[in-house]
Image: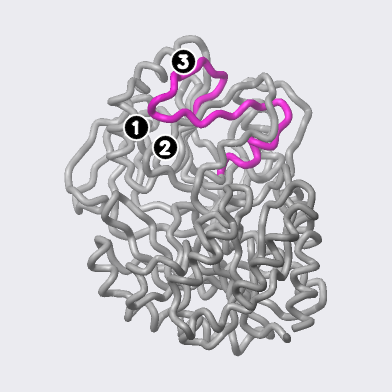
Amino acid sequence: MKIQTLMVQGTTSDAGKSTVVAALCRLLQREAVRVVPMKPQNMALNSAVTSDGGEIGRAQALQAQAAGLAPHTDMNPVLIKPSSDTGAQIIVHGKVRADMDARDYDQYKTVAMSAVLESYARLQQQYDAIVVEGAGSPAEVNLRARDIANMGFAEAVDCPVILVADIDRGGVFAHFIGTLECLSESERARIVGFVINRFRGDISLLEPGLDWLEEKTGKPVLAVLPYLHGLMLDAEDAIQVKQNTTGKFRIIVPAIPRIANHTDFDALRAHPDVDLQFIGPDHPIPAADLIILPGSKNTRDDLAFLQQRGWQQVLEKHLRYGGKVIGICGGYQMLGQVVSDPHGVEGRAGDSDGLGLLDITTELTQEKRLQQVQGTCAFGDNLTAKVEGYEIHMGITYASSDTLPAFVIANGAAIEEEGSRSPDDQILGTYIHGLFDHPDACHSLLRWAGLQSDVKVDLNSLREQSINRVADACLPLLQALQAM
């Protein structure tokens, strides 16, 4: 089978769809095939800024890297960013369209599908192969009407589908059979085979089950993929709580309900001298060298969450004993005196008292700022240390003359100061996501926070190594597809 458009769907969320798509993109790119990833609809709070000035899911940016491409909004034409349990910001072709509840969005899907098919048509004209990622599971029968994320898309463009299941969570055969039972006859027919992900153990003990599955369904098991430890790949949404290292320098991050872009901490998770911990609402808050307040999709509600759970007192004690604090995006806004939302951007108009740790005030605005940034650090003993990242926020922050800049950013021919530091240099706030990704910035920030280490973590190099590892593991899958 020559891959022109192939869709990768999963029996569950987190079955491994994103990783399989990235692996196939890298394998085809190695063969000099002009390949592009696509996810019609993504629901995630981890996002990236694209080359055309829009916003897409973080996993699609990783898949673009695997394909050797710059991220583009056509790779993820519809992005849903939940702001509450029932409401979300709807982003189409990289730009905010509206805030909707689940019922309103269900009706909006016909419009969203038009946008998806527009993007697909453009990608068809530019690339030889399109590897498409589904969302969640195609077996969600309550979402079948107006589906744009799974079989609704596959049927609309008439493409084959492979179905991935995670054996590590158990019940893999039931997942496959149950999914097929929930599909229509035409949908079942377009599934060309199964992929079992995250297998560890003796393959001979699995083979009777593979034979049974193939006989039961008439469909082949295309590949059994191994469980790969230590991968450094951007998570689509769920917090990556597993720490790759357990160093002595402790960093804690509150796991706020609407945490956004927690991929900001991947470089810290990989640092051999760092012990990074996400602290949930029911966990005791340990002493730390550095506390980082993360980005948020609902700054005022997450600010109230922190205040209700005693983080105000924790931060004040931490600073009294000489600790350092960093706030990123929404976390930066929380550090100030007031967060004002006059237009109800986050669902309800009004003002909230901030943590009062930086002399700044923030007003949430209706226009979202999306921008890739480059610059240098404005602190420490290496003012030439590079920082690279991106801004995604709805709000303007005003700093008093007492604050110091955090970074110096090149904006075309202009040079701008970005972020704020407290006069005593214990607190740093910034709108830059990915600020730890560049090895120089990560090294300078950790030295500023008190870690004396010569280690530099190159996150992009670690990503490349991980992409190549999953690609090598998926080579039998590509060969099976090409042989069909």
**Residue ID at (80%, 67%):** 475
Q: Earlier in the sequence, mark 1 or mark 3?
A: 3
The amino acid type found where label 1 is placed reads Gly
Percent x, y of residue 440: 71, 39
Percent x, y of residue 169: 58, 48
**Residue behind mark 1:** 336
Q: How is the image coloured?
A: one colour
**Residue behind mark 2:** 332
Is residue 477 rendered to the left or right of residue 350? right
Q: Nearer the viewer, residue 388 or 57?
A: 57
The amino acid type found where label 2 is placed reads Tyr
Q: How many labels were placed on the picture? A: 3
Residue contact between numbered discs 1 and 3, judged by CB atoms under 8 Å: no
Q: Earlier in the sequence, mark 2 or mark 3?
A: 3
Q: Nearer the viewer, residue 209 or 360?
A: 209
Vertical comparison of 287 with 95: above or below: above
Percent x, y of residue 435: 58, 43
Characterize the local packing of mark 1: few (<14), some (14-19) or many (20 or more) Cα atoms within 10 angstroms. Answer: many
Residue contact between numbered discs 1 and 2, judged by CB atoms under 8 Å: yes
**Residue behind mark 3:** 318
Vertical comparison of 114 with 374: above or below: below
The amino acid type found where label 3 is placed reads His
Indicate whether residue 468 is drawn in magenta: no
Characterize the local packing of mark 2: few (<14), some (14-19) or many (20 or more) Cα atoms within 10 angstroms. Answer: many
Q: Which residues are magenta?
A: 264-291
**Residue ID at (45%, 19%):** 285
Which is more foreground, mark 1 or mark 3? 3
Which is more foreground, mark 2 or mark 3? 3
Vertical comparison of 395 with 181: above or below: above
Rounded to the nearest whole Å, what is the CA distance between mark 2 and mark 3? 17 Å
